[in-house]
Image: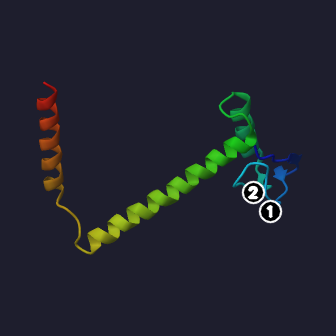
Amino acid sequence: MRETHFQHGTRGLAANHVERPSPQKGTLEMNIQLTNDAMQFVEGLVTSGEFESADEAVTEGVRLLMSRQRLRADIQKGIDELDAGLGIDGEEVFAELRARAKAAVESAS
C-alpha cells in the first residue's frame, strides 16, 4: 500500500510530493496539502473505519473526481449530438421503454 506522510501546519495538512514508484504496483507517491476542514474530514473517515488509511480516502476522492469528469464529457457529447440533430425524440424513447417493461412483466408472469 502507498504511504503518505501528513504533517499538521498552520494552514492545514501538508504532505510532500515525490514522483517515485511506490511499493504498490502501478502507483506513485504524491504529497499534498489539505485545508484543516479537509484534513479533519479525511481523518474522520479513517477513524470511523470507512477507510483504512488517509491514502485510501483521498484515492477514492480522486476516483470520484475522475468519474465526474467522464460524466461531464459524456453529457457534453450528448449535447453536441443533440445540437447536430442526432437525438431521438423523447416520446419514441419512452414508448420503447414502456414496451420493454410490458414485455418483461408479461414474461415474468
For the point 74% across and 37% down, the residue is: 53
Q: SS at mark 2?
A: loop
Image x and y of residue 84, in percent: 26, 75
The answer to whether one can see residue 71 in this image is yes
For the point 57% across and 54% down, the residue is: 65
Image x and y of residue 78, in percent: 33, 64
| Quadrant housing the C terminus | top left
Circle number at residue 32: none
Instruction: Specify the amino acid type for callout 2.
Output: Leu
Q: Which residue is mark 1?
A: 19
In three-dimensional space, the C-alpha distance between marks 1 and 2, rounded to whole angstroms, equals: 6 Å
In the displayed structure image, the side of residue 20 where residue 101 appears, left or right: left
For the point 74% across and 48% down, the residue is: 24
Instruction: Specify the amino acid type for callout 1.
Output: Glu
Q: Earlier in the sequence, mark 1 or mark 2?
A: 1
Q: Is residue 62 above or below residue 88?
A: above
| Quadrant housing the N terminus | top right
In the displayed structure image, the side of residue 21 where residue 74 appears, left or right: left
Q: Which residue is mark 2?
A: 28
The extreme front residue here reads 25
Image x and y of residue 3, in percent: 81, 46
- Depth order, front residue of 31/22: 22
- Depth order, front residue of 37/99: 99
> Could you say which quadrant of the image residue 20 lies in?
bottom right
- Depth order, front residue of 9/6: 6
